[in-house]
């Protein structure tokens, strides 16, 4: 598959390839590689190109990241980057029902290294939103030599609590009260609920960050999203 920009030019990061990658505990993950994977694999080109590992939030999948990466604002970064877009278990388009217990946020974070190993990618910069950001914080803490940095959008580090519960209710409102988009209609909503339940049952990640996270981490939240900002304050307290 090849992308085209609005002016019909083809960007450097123009290809999209699909990979189904087995992991140790969370099952097979669908991974979409945007760009020339060989640039992330070869030693002579690794220093010139940045490889991003993206993980989506609840209620969306890799398509949300594709839409963002292909926006005009990302044009210059696309020219020098390769993106590994992970669909969490059962969140890919037209997915069958997940019948087993959904893995925890910690298990997913730890098993993401299998994606790098299978694709023969040495290290990445994590890019995640919501549940995906929470997962990448765990990945970065567990695999310090494979993660150069993490960009976290609304990571919501707290376990289910008064603060976490309010933030998760906001997420549910975003998913449940609005008409589904065309992309969401392609997703298995039973599996979306399973991911939501796993995210609500997450363990706290702040102690893991305090002890083990060594890489640079950029934390982002909307200025008007007071609950998310408080979540960021909890993380910043450890630096």
Image (cartoon, rainbow, N blue to C red):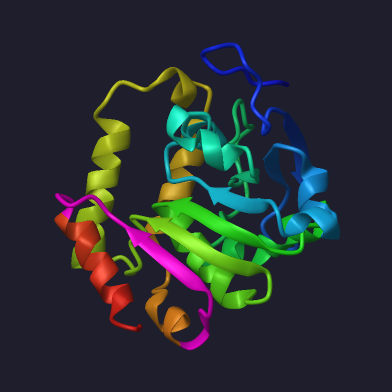
Quadrant assignment, res 149: bottom right
What residue is drawn where x is 42% and y is 72%?
203
Q: Tell me if residue 222 is in the magenta stretch.
A: yes
Query: Residue 25 at x, y = what percent?
Result: 70, 62
Residue 198 in view, yes or no: no
What residue is drawn where x is 53% and y is 49%?
55
What residue is drawn where x is 62% and y is 77%?
144
- In the image, 211 versus 193, the foreground residue is 211
Query: Residue 48 at x, y = what percent?
Result: 70, 54
Relative to 221, 98 lies left or right: right
Q: Tell me if residue 165 is in the magenta stretch.
A: no
What residue is drawn where x is 49% and y is 36%?
74
Rendered view: 202 above or below 50 = below
Residue 196 in view, yes or no: yes
Rendered view: 235 above or below 29 = below
Query: Residue 133 at x, y = what percent?
Result: 45, 57
Query: Residue 209 at x, y = what percent?
Result: 45, 79
Give the quadrant of the C terminus. Answer: bottom left
Q: Find the magenta span and give its range.
A: 211-225
């Amino acid at each position: 598959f090849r992308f085209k920009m609005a002016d019909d030019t083809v960007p450097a990061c123009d290809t999209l390839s699909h990979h189904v990658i087995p992991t140790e505990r969370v099952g097979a993950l669908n991974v979409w590689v945007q760009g020339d994977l060989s640039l992330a694999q070869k030693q002579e080109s690794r220093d010139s190109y940045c490889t991003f590992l993206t993980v989506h939030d609840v209620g969306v999948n890799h398509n949300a990241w594709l839409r963002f990466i292909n926006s005009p604002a990302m044009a210059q970064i696309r020219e020098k980057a390769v993106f590994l877009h992970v669909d969490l278990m059962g969140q890919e388009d037209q997915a069958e029902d997940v019948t087993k217990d959904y893995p925890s946020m910690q298990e997913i974070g730890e098993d993401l290294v299998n994606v790098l190993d299978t694709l023969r990618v040495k290290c990445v910069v994590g890019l995640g939103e919501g549940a995906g950001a929470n997962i990448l914080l765990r990945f970065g803490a567990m695999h310090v030599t494979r993660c150069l940095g993490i960009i976290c959008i609304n990571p919501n580090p707290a376990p289910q609590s008064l603060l976490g519960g309010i933030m998760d209710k906001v997420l549910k409102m975003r998913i449940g009260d609005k008409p589904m988009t065309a992309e969401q209609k392609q997703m298995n909503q039973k599996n979306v609920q399973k991911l939501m339940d796993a995210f609500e049952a997450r363990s706290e990640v702040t102690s893991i960050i305090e002890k083990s996270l060594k890489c640079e981490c950029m934390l982002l939240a909307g200025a008007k999203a007071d609950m998310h900002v408080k979540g960021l304050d909890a993380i910043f307290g450890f630096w």
